[in-house]
Image: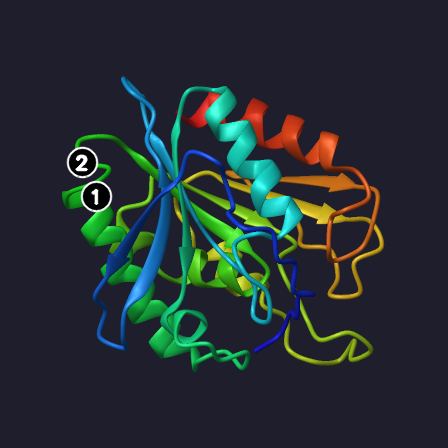
Amino acid sequence: MWGCDPIIRPSMPTAAATVVEIDTPHGPARAHVTKIRGAAGAVVLGHGAGGGVTSRDLVAAAEAAQAEKLSVALVEQPYRVAGRRSPAPARQLDAAWIAVVAHLHAKTLKGVPIVCGGRSSGARVACRTAAETGAAAVLCLAFPLRPPGRPSAPSRQDELDGVTVPVLVVQGTGDPFGMPAPGPSRTVVQVAGNHSLRSDLGTVRTAVREWLTEVL
């Protein structure tokens, strides 16, 4: 799985989050849900391959969503809940993600449109499963287009191109995984920094917040 994130260990991704454990075909996942009363929608985000839901760009995106009075769920894949660093195969990640979003949509976040997304490999999962989850839109932070140092490797642009709902990609100008192309319903915002997106979190928040006001 492409895209590795350094581990950051604050105690909670958001102070007001409620932890919900969700059964999936590949073990329990965990969602940190901040539910906003009267929210017009929700944003559900997954982590990168080697990181967790406390990655700074994920937290920044969550803050942007909450500023627009949207509920937020930050989702830990089963392999992370089980304490493993190495990511599960793509088909397992996708199946677990579909189960999590279905549960949230039916219960905790019932009755509102859901924007799915994530950082790095989490963004890939959200793209691949956008149709199955019924995502209203897809938010991609640091989409890993191709492995660093391998310009001839196959691109993952097709995963973005396969999404039929609006997509926002927030990408560092120095990201070694490359720069995705924009498209008819896909906006690509370039920010200073690399794959971690830590250099300009203010711009990340602004880009996410402005886009969310358009799609929800």
User: Residue 98 location, x and y as percent?
Assistant: 27, 60
User: Residue 192 location, x and y as percent?
Assistant: 84, 42
Marks 1 and 2, Cα distance to the nearest angstrom?
A: 5 Å
Residue 148 vertical position relative to residue 165 in the rendered view, above or below: below
The residue where tag 1 is placed is 105
Residue 107 vertical position relative to residue 20 in the rendered view, above or below: above
Res 17 quadrant in image: top left
Tags 1 and 2 in contact by the CB under 8 Å rule? yes
User: Residue 127 location, x and y as percent?
Assistant: 44, 57
Q: Amino acid at mark 2?
A: Lys
Q: Secondary structure at mark 2?
A: loop
Q: Toward the viewer: 156 or 125?
A: 125
Res 7 quadrant in image: bottom right
Q: Secondary structure at mark 1?
A: helix
Locate the N terminus and report the quarter of the image it occupies: bottom right
Q: Is residue 199 left or right of residue 162?
A: right
Q: Amino acid at mark 1?
A: His
Locate the C terminus and report the quarter of the image it occupies: top left
Residue at screen point 27% across, 17% down? 38
Residue 17 vertical position relative to residue 210 in the rendered view, above or below: below
User: Residue 19 location, x and y as percent?
Assistant: 33, 49
Task: Identify the mark at residue 184; answer none if there is no mark.
Answer: none
Q: Toward the viewer: 193 or 78?
A: 78
Task: Please rate how many residues cluster around mark 1, counting C-alpha atoms within 10 Å: few if below 14, some from 14 to 19, many from 20.
Answer: some
Which comes before the other along the chain, label 1 or label 2? 1
The residue where tag 2 is placed is 110
Res 111 quadrant in image: top left
Residue at screen point 82% across, 78% down? 149
